[in-house]
Image: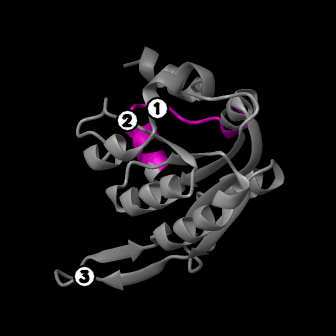
Amino acid sequence: MFYRDERLALFIDGANLYAAAKALSFDIDYRLLRQEFVRRGKLLRAYYYTALMDSEEYSPIRPLVDWLQYNGFTMVTKPAKEYTDSQGRRKVKGNMDIELTVDALHTAEHVDHIVLFSGDGDFLPLVAALQRKGVRVSVCSTLRSQPSMISDDLRRQADNFIELDELREVIGRPPRESDQAAVANG
């Protein structure tokens, strides 16, 4: 469903893609992911969206954010908000849907095809709006996790659905030695 001469842009909902890959028990090698879509078309931009905890001295996602920034990804971040819910539990909120939507709509006039890495049904109106502008939209997530990580309505609206699990061999990171030792010692 890709044409070599079409202009592509990737929009990665970082938290959603991380959750989908984790549900499938693999880690994504973002260098390989980018290479895969450079191979499929003319990749103009690869956006990655994530919220960051500013209050913590060390954020486990910071090394990834820095690496992505230096390796061809356009990083869009904002501070996550921390709050206490009605049961007194500490919660973190860092939804990036609006930022991703606005950027995708602005980018639409410069591309032929957008690949959205998210299964979030909240993106249904965005996909429909992009299609009305003449942009083809592929959605990458997974049906193979329990529960499924893709909204059925979003999958049906997309021009193309890419099963994340089918990209495992192409964009998956090899397990680290410590991971292999843990599996071997079972």
Image coordinates of residue 57 in percent, x first then y, are: 63, 73
Q: Earlier in the sequence, mark 1 or mark 3?
A: 3
- Front tag of 1 and 3: 1
Which class describes the residues within 10 Å of circle 3: few (<14), some (14-19), or many (20+)?
A: few
Residues 112 and 173: in front is: 112
As drawn, 36 above or below 11: above
Q: Is residue 25 magenta?
A: yes
Q: Earlier in the sequence, mark 1 or mark 2?
A: 2
- Under circle 2, the secondary element is loop
User: Would you name the residue on which mark 1 appears?
Assistant: 164
- Under circle 3, the secondary element is loop
**Rounded to the nearest whole Å, what is the CA distance between mark 2 and mark 3?**
30 Å
Could you tell me which residue is drawn at 65 percent across and 67 percent down? 106
- Under circle 1, the secondary element is helix
The three-letter code of the residue at mark 3 reads: Asp
Q: Which residues are magenta?
A: 17-32
The three-letter code of the residue at mark 2 reads: Thr
Q: Main secondary structure of the magenta part?
A: helix
**Is 110 left or right of 156, judged from the image as shown?**
right
User: Would you name the residue on which mark 3 appears?
Assistant: 85
- Quadrant, the N terminus: top right
- Front tag of 2 and 3: 2
Q: Earlier in the sequence, mark 2 or mark 3?
A: 3
Image coordinates of residue 55 in percent, x first then y, are: 56, 80
Image coordinates of residue 75 in percent, x first then y, are: 70, 62
